[in-house]
Image (cartoon, rainbow, N blue to C red):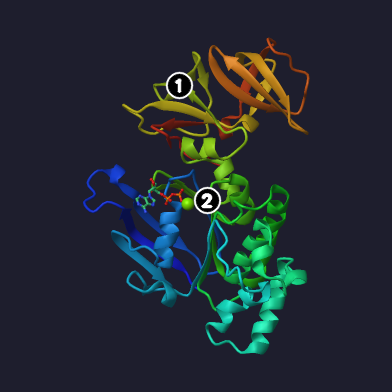
């Protein structure tokens, strides 16, 4: 097991990169603690797989270093890094039985058969593969094949890091939920550093203690699921996490105050230097309430989502979502909106630009 450190990491797939756009990874500095459960979350193409492949050694970075504990492994062969990597699509031996597939990584390293048998049965039980151990892998469903693939990654107990690259893509939705919570459980049991890559916020937030949010080859925020929800460092995080995402509203900043639709908006803290930047107010629908006074708005649509109603309103022609525990809203209805000041911030060119609220 190991702490993973990435230092000044940059990667381009081009031979002579010049512009920032030439880099799939722009400048990554990161430290993952030994035994932690981490997620790497971001839209398709933001550089997640590139980063994983650099950590496992399948790819050499253009610049920067990778350290396991305090040993530089940048030049170390993938095999010698002792990493288990699970890919989007199953990597298994079709002609072997399920048992032999799971046993392979251990036998390959000369683990004695009694221990192999014990580990294979443990992992098979955990992944609910125990009743098909004698079957050939070729006849199995994609779900089961991917479970074998995961099992092959999990079966060794001497790895530094286990990395999952969107492993649930091929899994049936009903099973996804189950496997997700299994992985979490597993992490608590084995305590190996795990890095889970996904574009799905639910997967990231349920699995990880800490989530790294990426966009366009850069890290935009690292935080616990609660931190990402409560205080997005960037409008991208506000939008990407949450359902619906954070409201991002055009605003004007004058004399240290923010104005939206001509009204002064109370904020979490003082506004920093925003001169020349595009300024916006960010507030999550969960922190917008429907009140008897406040910003004048018109209901466009109300969608009941179980215990809450998502009210889509318009202030002028700007869309503002609110979450309410009432469900008596009609399209066209005139309402007033209030933002919770402790959860309302100004963003400048996308980045948070208000001081943290003093508790
Ligand atoms: P993600 O896993 O987040 O979807 P990737 O790491 O696969 O993103 O890709 C990041 C960027 O690098 C994308 O713009 C992608 O097109 C590019 N890219 C990925 N692999 C290669 C490659 N082998 N050659 C050239 N460009 C690549
Ligand atoms: Mg990928």
Tell me residue 223's x, y (percent).
52, 51
Determine the CA span between mark 1 and mark 2.
27 Å
Residue shown at 70%/13% (left/top)? Answer: 331
Tell me the quarter of the image containing the C terminus: top right
Tell me residue 306's x, y (percent).
77, 33
Tell me residue 177's x, y (percent).
70, 52
Could you say which is closer to the camera, residue 75 or residue 282? 75
Left or right of 27 on screen, residue 270 = right
Residue shown at 41%/55% (left/top)? Answer: 50
Left or right of 34 on screen, residue 19 = left
Whether label 1 lies within 8 Å of ligand 1 gets the answer no
Kindly identify which numbered label has been placed on residue 223.
Answer: 2
Whether label 2 lies within 8 Å of ligand 1 gets the answer no
Label 1 SS: loop
Tell me residue 58's x, y (percent).
40, 65
Left or right of 325 on screen, residue 340 = left
Neighbor class of circle 2 (other Cα within 10 Å; few <14, some 14-19, many 20+) is: some
Task: Name the quadrant containing residue 128.
Answer: bottom right
Residue shown at 62%/61% (left/top)? Answer: 146
Label 2 SS: strand
Neighbor class of circle 1 (other Cα within 10 Å; few <14, some 14-19, many 20+) is: many
Asked whether residue 171 is in view, the answer is yes
**Which of marks 2 and 1 precedes in the sequence?**
2
Please name the residue that numbered disc 1 is placed on.
Answer: 251
């Amino acid at each position: 097991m190991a702490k993973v450190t990435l230092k000044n990491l940059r990667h381009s797939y081009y031979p002579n990169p010049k512009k920032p756009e030439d880099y799939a990874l722009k400048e990554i500095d990161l430290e993952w603690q030994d035994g932690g459960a981490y997620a790497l979350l971001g839209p398709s193409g933001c550089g997640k797989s590139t980063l994983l492949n650099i950590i496992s050694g399948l790819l050499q970075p253009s610049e920067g270093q990778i350290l396991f504990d305090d040993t530089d492994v940048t030049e170390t062969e993938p095999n010698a890094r002792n990493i288990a990597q699970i890919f989007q699509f199953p990597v298994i031996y079709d002609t072997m039985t399920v048992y032999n597939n799971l046993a392979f990584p251990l036998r390959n390293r000369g683990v004695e058969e009694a221990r192999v048998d014990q580990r294979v049965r443990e992992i098979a039980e955990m992944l609910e593969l125990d009743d098909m151990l004698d079957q050939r892998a070729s006849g199995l469903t994609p779900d089961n094949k991917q479970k074998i693939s995961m099992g092959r990654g999990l079966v060794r107990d001497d790895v530094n890091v286990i990395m999952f690259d969107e492993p649930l893509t091929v899994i049936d939705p009903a099973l996804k939920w189950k496997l997700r919570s299994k992985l979490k459980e597993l992490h608590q049991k084995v305590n190996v550093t795990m890095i889970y890559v996904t574009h799905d916020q639910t997967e990231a937030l349920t699995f990880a203690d800490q989530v790294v949010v990426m966009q366009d080859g850069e890290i935009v925020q690292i935080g616990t699921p609660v931190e990402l929800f409560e205080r997005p460092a960037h409008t991208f995080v506000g939008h990407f996490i949450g359902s619906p995402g954070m409201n991002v509203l055009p605003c004007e900043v004058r004399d240290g105050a923010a104005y939206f639709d001509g009204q002064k908006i109370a904020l979490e803290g003082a506004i920093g230097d925003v001169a020349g930047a595009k300024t916006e107010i960010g507030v999550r629908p969960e922190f917008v309430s429907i009140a008897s006074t406040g910003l004048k708005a018109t209901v466009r649509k109300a969608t009941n989502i179980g215990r809450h109603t998502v009210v889509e309103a318009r202030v002028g022609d700007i869309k503002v979502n609110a979450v309410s525990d009432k469900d008596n809203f009609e399209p066209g209805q005139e309402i007033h909106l209030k933002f919770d000041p402790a959860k309302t911030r100004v963003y400048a060119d996308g980045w948070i630009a208000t001081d943290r609220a003093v508790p």
